[in-house]
Image (tube, rainbow, N blue to C red):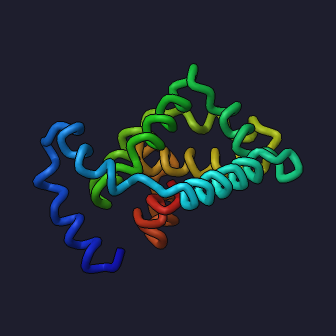
Amino acid sequence: MNTAQLAAARGRLPVLYRCAEPEVLAPLVDAARLDADARRRVRAMAAMLLAELRDPQHGGWIDRFLQQYPLNTDEGVALLALAEAYLRIPDAHTADALIRDKLGDGDWAAHRGASDSFLVNRATFGLAMTSALIEGGEHAPVVRRMIARLGEPAIRQGV
């Protein structure tokens, strides 16, 4: 899809905002179907990516991340809700609001250094920094100065 097509598609989103999901999705189902070859390629790529992410030789960091934030914690539920909703967000302003809503209340600092995975601990550090920025706690001025150089687009990209 080129830039003009993408802009046209995004321009149609506000009209669809309050429509019933089945009504909007029905015409798109056929267009979303993959032929057998494309389906095979997608499955192969997905299997390769999952194997790589879960490979203990590479730290198995996705599994460790999920162990650090299980769904019986507020933080795990917030991350699941963020992951589920984030892909459907139509614009940067709404994405920023979703991030503030989902990450602002978690006790991310309580998870700092709790994993034996360097990547999980770095992700936790990022979540704690984002939360400090959102909450405006004692570290907020330092975090704000640091983030001012990066801006919210960097946070969105990190999410």
Front residue of 68/91: it is 91
Q: Position of residue 35 (x, y in %)?
A: 49, 57
In the rendering, at what x and y percent does residue 27 appear? 23, 49
| Residue at the farthest top position | 72
Q: Residue at x 57, y 25 (%)?
A: 71
* Residue under the image location 41 percent in, 38 percent down: 102
Q: Is residue 10 left or right of residue 129?
A: left
Estimate the x, y position of residue 58 in percent, counting from the top left: 83, 53
- Numbered marks: total: 0
- Residue 121 visible at all: no
Q: Say whether residue 147 is visible.
A: yes
Residue located at (55% from left, 55% from top): 36
In the displayed structure image, the side of residue 91 where residue 159 appears, left or right: right
Q: Residue at x 70, y 48 (%)?
A: 50
Give the position of the N terminus as an image quadrant: bottom left
Instruction: Give the residue furthest to the right.
Output: 57
Which quadrant holds residue 148? bottom left
Decide which of 20, 137 is in the foreground and name it. Answer: 20
Locate residue 21: give its quadrant.
Answer: top left
Q: Position of residue 158 (x, y in %)?
A: 53, 59
- Relative height, residue 91 to residue 88 (above, below): below
Nearer the observer, 10 or 63: 10
